[in-house]
Image: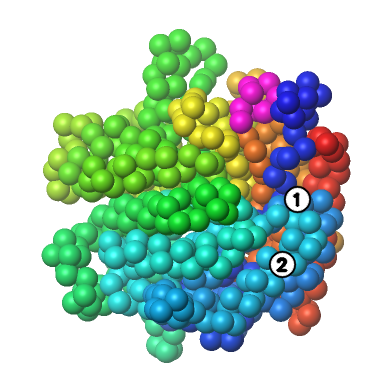
Amino acid sequence: ILVEKARAEGKLPADFKWGAATAAYQVEGAWNEDGRGESVWDHFTHLYPHNVEGEEGNEDSISGNVACDSYHKFDEDIEMMKIMKATHYRFSISWSRLFPDGQAKKEEGKWNVNEKGVEYYNSVINKLIENNVTPLVTLYHWDLPYALHEKYGGWLDYHSQYDFANYAEFCFETFGDRVKNWITINEPWVNCVSGYRLGPGKAPYRCTGEAPRKLANETEGLDLQGGCSYEIGPSQYSPESEVLEANRPPQRLEDVWCSHNILLAHAQAVKVYREKFQKEQNGLIGITVDGEAQIPWIEPGMSEEQKKINEEYANLAAEFRIGWYSDPPVTGDYPQSVKERMGKDLPEFTEEQKAMLKGSSSDFLGWNTYTAHWAAPIEGQTPPTPEEANFENSKRDMWDDNCRGRGDGWTCIPPTLGSQAGSSWNTKYPPTIRVGLNWFSKRYEGLINNGIIITENGCAQPNAKVSRANDEVTAEYFKSIDQPEYADTYEEEIIENEDDKNTIIRDLYRVDWYQQYLENLRLAFVEDKIDVRGYMAWSLIDNFEWENGYETRFGMSYIDFKNDPELKRQPKESLKFLGQWYDENIMQE
Ligand code: PNW
């Protein structure tokens, strides 16, 4: 009834989950306080300081050592939530803050947990609830305990699923009386492809290429590109991981195996929740996947036949870019197209694993959406056909290096779609959210009980550092296909000087971003009747943007990391805009 009433008024229903998102390593700081253990991000940012953009010699500027210090300043974060009228807040738990060596064990009814960590998350959860904000908790947002990487190669080893499930069980048991919305894993694709294939992007900085390497203590002839950590391979694998010793993924397939193991870890955690907690605690659990909606390339005067080819291609591209990760937790297996075209390079799930995976994200599906890709088959850049899939060093490797590794899914045609925001991959094409919601909804009809939640959406304010060549190309294109409204370049909003606080706070590019993406979300709900249940903006506050450091700002609240030791949060225009959007577009009972 709520839904019908809302649709009739062109609004979102009163129980719509409305909020902002952050992640532990990006905001908490306090990296070595109160017994927290090292994560791969602590370890590798310290080991390879040149892999993150920051100030030479200033360790805090290239790591999450201090970040926004939310570990001590969480009250101030709550003040920001109020401005946007958040009903929900999505944050993540740092696994190594609770279990410094990553291995949760319960003996005689007692967990080997770091109590200070528990105190912190209890206080976060309780404060949210006191302030009428519902917690939406991510268990893993890329900060794998370093001890597990060292012990057996982290996500490369199938043991990781059991360690993750034990940690998850502790969280359900301890926080589940108050936390009713759980996300197991954030963005398996980014975690695995950027962490184990592309180099050096995300920790643990493994990659397939011959990237130059320099450690923190090597001062001679520093190579500012930083390095990949693949050379630490075999010796890091302890005898305990006998299975992996025998079946170690070849370097070229590490991202594929990471993906496989992380999907299993998700399913194991859900199994624990379903069997031991869900009935009594009455909460929901799901996974969050990333991936650009794939927009078929069209041209003025293009034949119907070619349009159809490109549409089919777009679906195939989406199966590779998104379905690879979202199908297993819903349908229980990889998409047929991926299996056929990856051939024997793709690990198989056993029947038992398929059964465990199936429906493991049937409560809800989380989707992080930012950018769109064009899709069209381009000569020399298509993935292998099933016939070509079974050769070592085959066409698939070429395609992987040229296309998949670059993040273009199956499409492989530059540039990405829309005006350039402040991070290289981050372009603005608002219909992407509506296209993607429709794609999921059609693909998983009847398989997801409580709809899709947009668990992240947002942009970095455009700055002078990022190449804007894409703008002109896409602007021309949009004009040619009669969509001039997407031909924006927003030159007046580009920040020339990193310290131009006024431009950063008057973040009109971002206001426009939210306005347009939210309008597309509203249309998906009202017109297309898509079951979308929530929207979390990324991000509540400026924070540690991984390899891009602190000057790539996704936040709706400004922090002067360089000059303000208090790290005061200051609301930007966009934060206020969201509060207004809430009033105007979401039913108030
Ligand atoms: C997400 N891409 O990452 C993450 O979940 C956040 O932690 C991050 O801060 C945010 O988006 C902004 O980057 C992504 O290359 C990283 O398409 C890269 C991509 C997408 C999302």
Q: Position of residue 167 (x, y in %)?
A: 45, 68
The residue identified by callout 1 is 87
Judge from the rendering whether residue 565 lies leftward or rightward of residue 397; answer left or right. Answer: right
43 inside magenta stretch: no
Near mark 1 (Cα within 10 A), the count class, few <14, some 14-19 or many ≥20, is many
N-terminal of the pair, mark 2 or mark 1, is 1
Query: Label 1 is placed on what type of residue?
Result: Thr
Relative to 332, residue 575 above or below: below
Near mark 2 (Cα within 10 A), the count class, few <14, some 14-19 or many ≥20, is some
In terms of depth relative to the viewer, which is nearer, 208 or 125?
A: 125
Judge from the rendering whether residue 350 lies leftward or rightward of residue 154; answer left or right. Answer: left
Residue 337 shows in this picture: yes
Q: Position of residue 94 (x, y in %)?
A: 54, 70
Report the number of numbered marks: 2
Relative to 317, residue 169 above or below: below
Query: Label 2 is placed on what type of residue?
Result: Asn
The residue identified by callout 2 is 126
Q: Select label 2 or label 1 by which is in front.
A: 2
Q: Position of residue 573 (x, y in %)?
A: 83, 53
Residue occupying image coordinates x 61% and y 31%: 531
State the SS at label 2: helix
Looking at the rendering, the stretch of residues picked out in magenta corresponds to: 523-531
Q: How is the image coloured?
A: rainbow
State the SS at label 1: loop
Q: Position of residue 232 (x, y in %)?
A: 28, 76
